[in-house]
Image (spheres, helix red, strand yellow):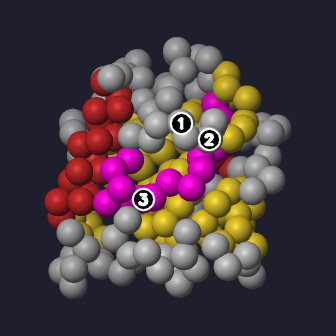
Amino acid sequence: MRSGRGYVMVALMTLLMAGTGSAALALSAGPSTGSSSVAAGEVVHHVRQAGPAGVQGVNAPDTGEVIPAGMLAAGAPSPLPPQVIHVSNAWQTSDGAQLVVVYAGGAGDNATNGRFVIVRQSEPAGTQTVNVVDVPATGPVSIINAPTAVTDPTQAELPYRTVAGALGVLRLGDDTATTG
């Protein structure tokens, strides 16, 4: 296991252990420069990670490696526990400085919601973020017709389909999902 994956797992386990009841959800992770609080029921939860320079993250390439945009192979292992997301599929890209991996599926804590987990790693800054974007009342979501040519991994738009067949777009520029 790469050390960066450990950082992600610490963040995700903190997310799980904090719970999502009616109280505020405090998120922090591994070696961190801070934490944030998110009120229960918020659509986007942020976990900021800071690790040593050169730490490898989820599916991270060697330093500076470019990964063409594309879907991960069906059945590829996910570092995310089922309590966070039941993964339908995943997409990744890297321009050599920014790695972005997006997992799509159903919310592990509420099967009626779709969920995206967005893992970003900035090689120059040595930071990693894990953002969760819920798509309420849609059931699981799947990325479809994902872009294969991306010039800026932080601004990509990923089309998705809900289990009922509704179409939507996940915008990585502001981590929002719009269905319909």
Q: Is residue 87 magenta?
A: yes
Q: Residue 149: x and y, percent?
A: 82, 38
Could you give the CA–CA distance between mark 2 and mark 3, rounded to whole angstroms? 16 Å
Write the start and end of the magenta stretch as one range: 80-94
Going by the numbered disc 3, the residue's amino acid type is Ile
Mark 2 or 3, nearer chain start:
2
* Residue at which label 2 appears: 74
The crowd level at tag 1 (other Cα within 10 Å; few <14, some 14-19, many 20+) is few
Asked whether the residues under the numbered discs 2 and 1 touch, taking CB atoms below 8 Å apart as contact, a structural biologist would say yes
Asked whether the residues under the numbered discs 3 and 1 touch, taking CB atoms below 8 Å apart as contact, a structural biologist would say no
Q: Residue 176: x and y, percent?
A: 60, 68
As helix, strand or loop, the secondary structure at mark 3 comes to strand
Q: Quadrant of residue 109?
A: bottom left
Q: Is residue 159 left or right of residue 115?
A: right
Residue 165 visible here: yes
Q: Residue 61: x and y, percent?
A: 54, 21
Q: Is residue 64 above or below residue 41?
A: above
Asked whether the residues under the numbered discs 2 and 3 touch, taking CB atoms below 8 Å apart as contact, a structural biologist would say no
The crowd level at tag 3 (other Cα within 10 Å; few <14, some 14-19, many 20+) is many
Q: Is residue 25 left or right of residue 157?
A: left
As helix, strand or loop, the secondary structure at mark 2 comes to loop
Residue 85: numbered disc: 3
